[in-house]
Image (cartoon, grey):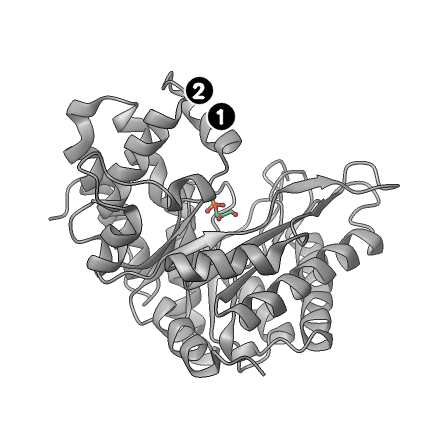
Amino acid sequence: MSPYLEELKVTAQAMVAKGKGILAMDESNGTCNKRFEKLGIPTTEEYRQAYRQLILTTPDLSNYISGPILYDETIRQSTTEGVPFLKVITDAGMIPGIKVDTGAKNLANHPNEKVTEGLDGLGERIAEYYQMGARFAKWRAVITIGDGIPSRACIEANAHGLARYAALCQEGGLVPIVEPEVLIDGNHTLERCFEVTDETLHTVFNHLYTQGVAFDQMILKPSMVIPGKDCPTQVSVEAVAEATINCLLKNVPVTVAGIAFLSGGQSIEQSSAHLNAMNALFGSRCPWPVTFSYARAIQQPALDYWSGDSARVAEAQQKLLARAKCNSAASVGEYSASMDETPVLV
Ligand code: 13P
């Protein structure tokens, strides 16, 4: 049993406190640089630091965000005034988190499928991050839907990795965010997405159980049950919400501390509308808090507007805050599209 038992429970509950969600800003340098390149922002550590400083020093962010997920480069950085980012986060009353996987790599013998790596030395890295001040962690597994995939091998390998990671986190004092992402890419239907998400969640919880992971000390970060981006039959907001909640109710133990969705390439409005419908229409059926752990659906308008221009920081921060506020409202079923049409909210 983890010596951190009580602390882990308290942290997990604080991560999904009413009206709050998690801000994913843990893009690896490679992913961050790709997003910068699209906007002509220099792909240097200096600009990555400036962007992360913009996010973390946004006034009032903690009204809507329980904690940010950082990347290894970011957790070691400070503001240009020399204040460590970790201090900025805790001074604002937020909880620091850290991405600990080392990325999705090709799965041997299985073309077009990935397995997430990062178990080597993970116990030591968790100990270092805990000592630095991190209190939760993230590991993302990727499941692709396509012709004849996902394979059983892919789902099993990823579920095993997630469970080994989660057990190590709890032993080392970090609340694990368990993220099995079923990708939105492809032309699959809502029904096919349900089938794959169902099998994935079932397998993940089976492995979590086998590895002795305590469900009340973890957060599940799932994707929504939604037709593929290129599926000709798109469905209503209510249909996505209903299918997603049904899939979760079928597979997620009631003791899990919380659900915090990824946005996965949905538009910013869709990400909020879907989360909102889950809470507004089906909240009373859910035994766990249902909130967000978005990256793009919080960051994108701010990143687009900033585009590396130091004169645009304050307004970019307002755009970030506005998206955080919309998603906070969605987490309690009080979002409406008109909130996104009002640009500055404070
Ligand atoms: P998106 O919300 O942009 O999908 O990112 C969430 C995340 O953390 C992916 O690992």
Assign the N terminus to one quadrant of the image: bottom right
Q: Residue 317: x, y in percent? A: 21, 39
Q: Outermost residue, right direction?
A: 109
Q: Which mark is residue 268?
A: none
Left or right side of 304 for 125: right
Any part of residue 195 in sight: no
x, y percentage for residue 109? 88, 41
Q: Is mark 2 within 8 Å of ligand 1?
A: no
Disc 2 target residue: 37
Residue 51 in the image: x percent, y percent? 31, 33
Q: Is residue 7 visible?
A: yes
Q: Is residue 112 above or below residue 247?
A: above
Say what amino acid the circle numbered 2 marks. Answer: Glu
Identify the residue at horizontal 36%, vertical 19% (top origin): 41
Q: Residue 164 sits in which quadrant? A: bottom right
Q: Residue at x 33, y 26 (%)?
A: 47
Q: Amino acid at mark 1?
A: Lys
Circle 1 crowding by C-alpha within 10 Å: few under 14, some 14–19, many from 20:
some
User: Dot 2 lies on which element?
Assistant: helix
Q: Secondary structure at mark 1?
A: helix
State the residue in front, 31 or 277: 31
The answer to whether mark 1 is within 8 Å of ligand 1 is no
Picture quadrant where residue 112 is located? top right
Instruction: Judge the density around disc 2: few (<14), some (14-19), many (≥20) Cα neighbours within 10 Å.
Output: few
Label 2 – label 1 distance at C-alpha: 5 Å
Which residue is nearer to you in this view: 187 or 301? 301
Q: Above or below — where is 47 with respect to 272?
A: above
Position of 276 relative to 249 (above/below): above
- Is mark 2 in CB contact (under 8 Å) with mark 1? yes
What residue sits 72% from the left and 55% below the top? 158
- Above or below 19: residue 89: above
Q: Mark 1 sits on what residue?
A: 34
